[in-house]
Amino acid sequence: MNDISTAFNKARKIVIKIGSNTLAKPDGTQNTEFMADFATQCAGMIKKGKQIVLVSSGAQVAGVSTTKEWARKKDVHYRQALCSIGQVELMHQWRKAFCKEYLHIGQLLLTKDDFESEHRSLNIRNTLFTLVDEGVIPIINENDSVSCDEIKIGDNDNLSALTAILWSADMLILFSDIDGVYSDNPKTNPKAKLIESVSSIPELYKNIKIGETNSFGTGGIETKLQAAEKVTAYGIEMLLANGGKEKILETLSTDNAKGTLFKVE
């Protein structure tokens, strides 16, 4: 087996972050087919003894799908209201997807303040352990409807890293719309090379070009590297892979696994 499949198969407690681009169709609406298939894959992993916590983007995408006339509104209050509407729809679709696998879900909406408060972070940790121990899938997102610059984390890459640390996960997986970290942007440079293994993040910064964020997401490679720095410091390996690939969770357990594995030194 390669390094990725070896690390994935060894990990028992896994935090999986799914980005907005993975959850959105090209027209910006929710990819409910992906959600249903992904729930099936998660159920398969759980039967093999793995425990899973999801960090799911997509509230704004779901809001646009539900209230199309707000799609072009840029006012912050409309964006927060859109996330409020979308969060309900997002969880409804996740509930439907996991219900078919006879699994319940639980929702946690968090802000930076929750992780900085010792009392609240302990409550989050206890809730995560209780949900997972009872066979429930925790689904976490930032509380975008109330977040402002002072209390928001700003992206779900870093939110998932904080969650992995708090839950004492074995691995963090960031699913995006790219196969991993490349030497350059593979969408504009066909000669860009996939970097499959990273042992030193400072060294990695010297050898890659940091691109801009994508159309639906709030993060980019920069926030993914920030997440990697956070979790590897706590002995948690991180994997960046393309969540849109067919049967991606199942593929990660085989020699066909592709992505970028951030190793623990």
Image (cartoon, rainbow, N blue to C red):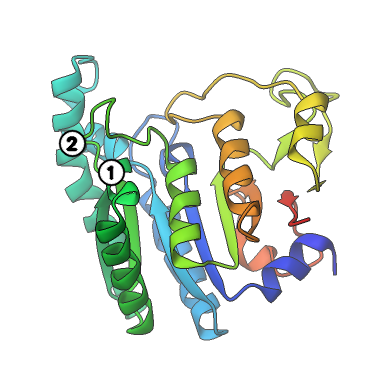
Quarter containing the C terminus:
bottom right
Which residue occupies the foreground of this view, 132 or 89?
A: 132
The quarter holding residue 172 reads bottom right
The quarter holding residue 92 reads bottom left
User: Contact, CB < 8 Å: mark 2 with mark 1?
Assistant: no
Q: Is residue 103 visible?
A: no
Give amino acid for label 1.
Asp
Secondary element at tag 2? loop
- Horizontal side of residue 100 vs 164, given as left or right: left
Position of 234 relative to 65 (above/below): below
- Horizontal side of residue 144 vs 255, given as left or right: left
- Horizontal side of residue 43 vs 202, given as left or right: left
The quarter holding residue 122 reads bottom left
What residue is pinned by disc 1?
113
Which residue occupies the foreground of this view, 242 or 127?
A: 127
First in residue order: circle 2 vs circle 1 = 1
Q: Can residue 217 be seen in this view?
A: yes
What residue is pinned by disc 2?
145
Is disc 2 surrounded by few (<14), some (14 to 19) or many (20+) residues within 10 Å? Answer: many
Which tag is nearer the camera, tag 2 or tag 1?
Answer: 1
- Horizontal side of residue 119 vs 252, given as left or right: left
Instruction: Residue at 46%, 23% (x, y): give it.
Output: 215
x and y, in percent, of residue 173 in the image = 58, 55
